[in-house]
Amino acid sequence: MSARADPRVAVVGAGGVGGYFAARLAAAGRNVSVIARGAHLEAIRSSGLRLESVAGDAVAGVTATDDPAEVGPVDVVLLAVKTWQVGEAAAASRPLLGEATTIVPLQNGIEAADRVAAIVGSGPVLGGVARIISYVAGPGLIRHVGGPAAIEFGELDGQASDRLETVRAILDVPGTRVTISGDIRVALWEKLMFVVPFGAVGAVTRAPIGITRALPGTRRMIDDAMREIETVARTLGMRLADDVPQRAWSFLDALPAAGTASLQRDIAAGRPSEMEDWCGTVVRAGERAGVPVPVLTFIYHSLLPLESRARGELTFVD
């Protein structure tokens, strides 16, 4: 795969993550299309994709549609929907795929790339990690409040390939840090080590990170959850760096005190969340590996009634 003079990028899911990267790419002159829906789509069509960011604001002109067939084949697809939407979004993305298209899923968890590969074939798919704290603040408006605003990606088999540098060149624009990973599956587990404890403890306590990292009891819960994930990953053969817990804490301690994870915000709002791909993934992996994960098991089952209600599977009043 070699980059064209005018590379085309499609962002499927223009929420907090996808919307941020779409805005930065378009502001840098990339030919960007976003696949969105509803009032968000209409606002982007009428007023552009607006970004309020701690790294600088932008208003980006993008092609916005709810039909990937209107876009056609592109060079890179960033798949930025929620984890439970991956299957549907991957199938709907087929019109975006040409002979040399690369798909980079940016979901939390460790399974998204394999789900995409099962639907569209393994050839186009890389593994991807996004590191950013941003959300949809209103129709057509993305608010970025922290995090490195970074994308890391790599081949799922850990091998080097020519297309990695091409994709890096396309995505590497001001306001986005882009890294090629030597082992993207390890990178996915390492991200899980901070995003799951951060989001899970926040969701069960309904407190922001400034509180949960300051109180001794909840800080210990976060740390214990990190260690549970680390033990499961190492038992499953992941070669995590020795300093992963320290790096995870450095990231969490640097977050704005009011920071919350998308998992916490979705559960608090009564929306379906990514709990199954955050907490649930670790609980099930722990069972397979024979590794107890008591903190995350408690949190998972504590949140499951709320998650089931949000999905219409249970009915009850608080």
Image (spheres, rainbow, N blue to C red):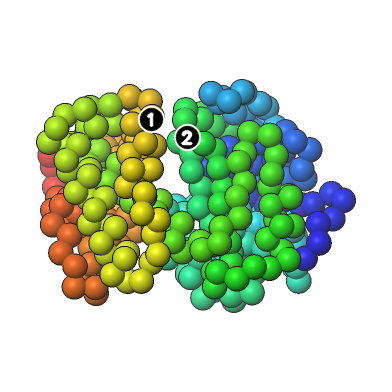
Marks 2 and 1, how far apart at CA: 7 Å
Looking at the image, which residue is at 61% across and 55% down? 180
- Which amino acid is tagged 2? Gly
Residue 154's label in the rendered image is: none
The reply to whether discs 2 and 1 touch (Cβ–Cβ < 8 Å) is yes
- Which amino acid is tagged 1? Leu
Q: Position of residue 31 (x, y in %)?
A: 77, 45
Report which residue position mark 2 lands on: 147
Mark 2 / mark 1, whichever is N-terminal: 2
Looking at the image, which residue is at 73% across and 66% down? 162
Secondary element type, mark 2: strand
Locate residue 230 relative to residue 291 in the image: left or right.
right
The quadrant in which the C terminus is found is top left
Locate residue 262 relative to residue 268 in the image: left or right.
right
Q: Tell me, yes or no, if residue 81 can be seen here.
A: yes
Q: Tell me, yes or no, if residue 39 can be seen here.
A: no
Q: Residues within 10 Å of mark 2 (few under 14, many from 20)?
A: some
Locate residue 59 relative to residue 138 in the image: left or right.
right
Q: Residue 11 versus residue 171: which sits nearer the camera?
A: 171
Report which residue position mark 1 lands on: 255
Looking at the image, which residue is at 59% across and 75% down? 122
The answer to which image quadrant residue 42 occupies is top right
Query: On screen, 10 above or below 249?
Result: below
Q: Position of residue 40 (x, y in %)?
A: 56, 37
Q: Position of residue 257 (x, y in %)?
A: 33, 24
Query: On screen, 197 above or below 219?
Result: below
The quadrant in which the N terminus is found is bottom right
Secondary element type, mark 1: loop
Q: Residue 92 versus residue 102: which sits nearer the camera?
A: 102
Looking at the image, which residue is at 56% across and 29% down? 141
